[in-house]
Image: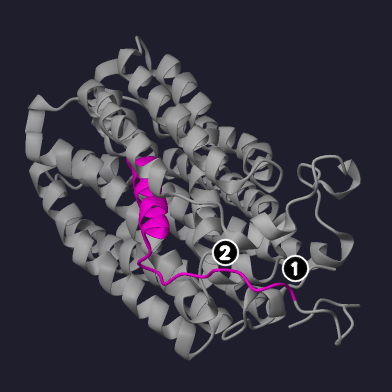
Amino acid sequence: MPLPGQPPDAPRPLRVRLHGWRHPAILSAAFVSMAAGFAQFGATAALGDVAAAFGELGEGTTIADQVALSGTTLGVGLAVIRLASVASLPLAGLADRRGRRSVLIGCCAGGLALTAAAALSPSFWWLVAVFALGRPLLSATNAVAGVVAAEETRSADRAKAIALITAGYGTGAGLTALVRGVGGGQVGFRLLFALALVPLALLPFAGRLLEEPDRYARLRAPAGDASLRPRLGHVAPLLRPRLVLLAALTFAIAFVTGPVNAFLFVYAEGVVGLTPASTALVVLAAAPVGLAGLLTGRWAADRFGRRRTAGLAHVAVAVGGAVTYTSGVTGAVAGYLLGAIFAASAYAPSAGALGTEVFPTSVRATAAGWLTVAGVLGAVAGLLAFGLVADAFGSFGPAAVAVAAPVALAAVGYAGLPETRGLELEESAPES
């Protein structure tokens, strides 16, 4: 689908090598995304342990008495970590200047190293500061991994490749909770964070399998032509309306997924009484549920289109988030598995494909950086709103409804985006 003003007889680009979704380069990108997921989700999975270590449990019924730190303190701390991901925009944009491969490896290595360093934190706010330094690197890693998956594949394999990247990230995130649950009280937050050294040690081996996508290599500006080099954060005016709309939708869904995922372990263990072992079982169940969601979302994105699949999943995520915190143990487990896992997993392939297919190669990583920033701001806003409402009402239920209701309504925005199913990147977003 040509951009506005693009002549229908524009010259076709040179042929490029494209791979299937199981190519070693894409599998390697999925591993890198898994490492980023493990590092990023550590603060969330261990939040209860962190709060207990740096706070003080009470005998009352307030959130601070139950989990050792107030909902506002936890919300602000998590919001600071999330907000730091705004710095991922220039890092992701570097992939349009320096190449996908070098940025992907460098950002992942730095993020893992900082996560391991957080194990030495002497206080809650010190830990927040270290995680805030590593967060932009890890966010940029995941954004560029999705760009690599999109550019290395043809249309028929693109949703599958992006689903694989999402599965890698989800596997890494799930491993943090699994390790903590299986280890019981023996695996505290310090050991959990130090385990980031394991994927860091394996990163050089994964890096050997990564390659620069041909789509990027063919369009890379000549070394001496500064006018052709992309500027950090710059997107052409014709592309800005769709970028703004996609950013608004990304903000909306992060507004609910941010707090729903971040407060889950505190709520499940500190309020409804699940043990770490029980939480680990829920995380184990999340693996097949998430896989089913990814397969469903990938199939629907290729069968019914990117927009329709993303819109329906968007609504389901919001509804699931509200159920998670309003219906006791049953709602916490069912809402989490069906909303935060199944629906969010189904959302990822369609939204991820759409986010790469509507932007040309020259600014695709930069656009991914902007969408990452939108997600960060949405999550931060959601965390702050969730924490403040939870403290005001003394309960997580009203907070969940407050963040979920507007998000469900925002799903109508997908109607304003072009449908890109079945189109190659050169067709859905040709270079102007």
Quadrant where the image shows the N terminus: bottom right
Q: Position of residue 8 (x, y in %)?
A: 85, 87
> Which residue lies under the disc numbered 1?
242
Find residue 284 and report its image quarter: bottom left
Kindly report which numbered mark, 2 or 1, lies closer to the viewer in this rendering: 2
* Identity of the residue drawn at 28% across and 52% down: 171
> Which residue lies under the disc numbered 2?
151
35 inside magenta stretch? yes
Circle 1 crowding by C-alpha within 10 Å: few under 14, some 14–19, many from 20: some
Amino acid found under the numbered disc labelled 2? Glu
Alpha carbons under labels 2 and 1: distance apart: 20 Å
Do the residues under discs 2 and 1 have CB atoms within 8 angstroms? Answer: no
Q: Position of residue 351 (x, y in %)?
A: 53, 69
Find residue 216 and report its image quarter: bottom right
Amino acid found under the numbered disc labelled 1? Arg
Circle 2 crowding by C-alpha within 10 Å: few under 14, some 14–19, many from 20: many
* Identity of the residue drawn at 16% across and 39% down: 179
Q: Which residues are magenta?
A: 13-38
Secondary element at image label 1? helix
